[in-house]
Amino acid sequence: MMEKLFIKNRKGLKMSVIVETPNPKQHLKEEGTPKSKIVTQKELAFVMHGLGGFKEQIHIHTFADAFRNEGCVVVRFDTTNTLGLGESEGKYEDATITNYYEDLEDVISWAKSQSWYKEPFWLCGHSLGGISTILFAEKYPAKVKGLAPISTVISGKISLDSPKYKGNDILEQWKKTGWRIEASKSQPGLVKKLKWSHMEDRLAYDVLPQVKKLRMPVLMIVGDKDDSTPVEHQKILFESLPGKKELHIIKEAPHTFVDSEQLLHIEKIFRTWIKKNK
C-alpha cells in the first residue's frame, strides 16, 4: 500500500512524502515466511535522493523496493530545493547539503508521530542524500540499524578532487560567475542552475572526523564509471569504517544507476545485506 502526503519542514516549506507498507501476502509468497513473523518483524527505512533528484527516480525506487520486499515500511521524499519533477517547494539553485540534511531530520521527526514508526531504522541515500544519511547516523548512531550511503559525497574537499572537475575550468567558472549551468540528465530538456554558495556550504562538511561512530552495518555501492564520487573516494570512507561493511563496485555504471540489469543486481545486493543484518 502506498500513501502520498505533504508535510512542512522547519522553514515552513511543503515537502512531498511517500509511505509504502509491505504486502504481507506477497512477502509470504516470496520468502515462505509465516505471516505472524512478518508482522512482528516489520521495520522502517528512509530512502533519500541526491542533488536535483526526486523520489520516483528508478534507482531510488530500486533501493526502496529492496527494503519493502524485505518487510519494511519505506519512506521516500522529495527534498526542498530540487528539480522540476520533485513535488516539494523551493528552488534548485538554493540546494545545499545543509538543506538536504535538515529535510531528512524533519521527515524523521514527522515520522515519530506515525503509528508505523520504529527505532532503530534503516537509512539509505544517494550522493548528496548519502552524505545526509551519514551525517544523521553520526549524530544519532543509536537510531540507525543499518546505513546505505550509495555513490556518496564524503566531504566538500574530496568533491573538489573528483574527475568531473579535473582537466577543465568548471570550478573556476562556477566560482567566477557564481553559477554552474548544465543540462539535466534525469530530466531531459531541463537546465540546472546552481549557485556557488552550494559549494561553499559543501566545503563545511566532512564525514571522516566522526566516522568511528558508524558501528552499524554499512552498505556502499558505486559505479566504476562514476566521475562525481569515484571508486577511489569511496574506498577512503570504506577503509575508515569501524564495523561490518561492504563495498560493491558496479561495472560500467555511472554516478546515477539507470541500466535495468545493473539495478536488478543492486536490488539483490541490498536484499542480501538486509537479510544478513536484520
Image (cartoon, rainbow, N blue to C red):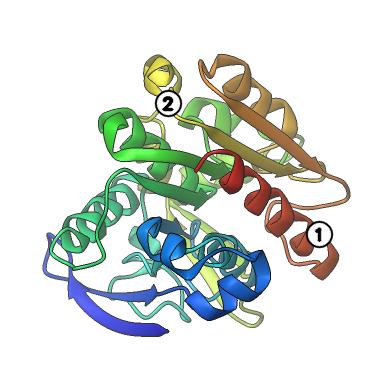
The kind of residue on which mark 2 rests is Val
Residue 124 or 29: which is nearer the viewer?
29
Residue sitting at 60 percent across and 40 percent down?
276
Image quadrant where residue 142 sits: top left
Image quadrant where residue 43 sits: bottom left
Residue sitting at 27 percent across and 82 percent down?
5
Residue 185 seen from this side: no
Give the Cα distance between marks 1 and 2. 28 Å
**Horizontal placement of 154 versus 43: left or right?**
right
- Count of residue discs: 2
The label shown at residue 262 is 1
The kind of residue on which mark 1 rests is Gln
Up-down relation of residue 208 to residue 144 (above or below)? above
Up-down relation of residue 233 to residue 43 (above or below)? above
Which residue bears the numbered disc 2? 207
x, y percent for residue 61: 58, 70
**Horizontal placement of 245 versus 1: left or right?**
right
**Horizontal placement of 159 versus 4: left or right?**
right
- Secondary structure beneath dot 1 equals helix
x, y percent for residue 251: 87, 46
x, y percent for residue 222: 71, 43
- Secondary structure beneath dot 2 equals loop
x, y percent for residue 44: 37, 57
The label shown at residue 59 is none
Residue sitting at 81 percent across and 66 percent down?
259
Q: Residues within 10 Å of mark 2 (few under 14, many from 20)?
A: some
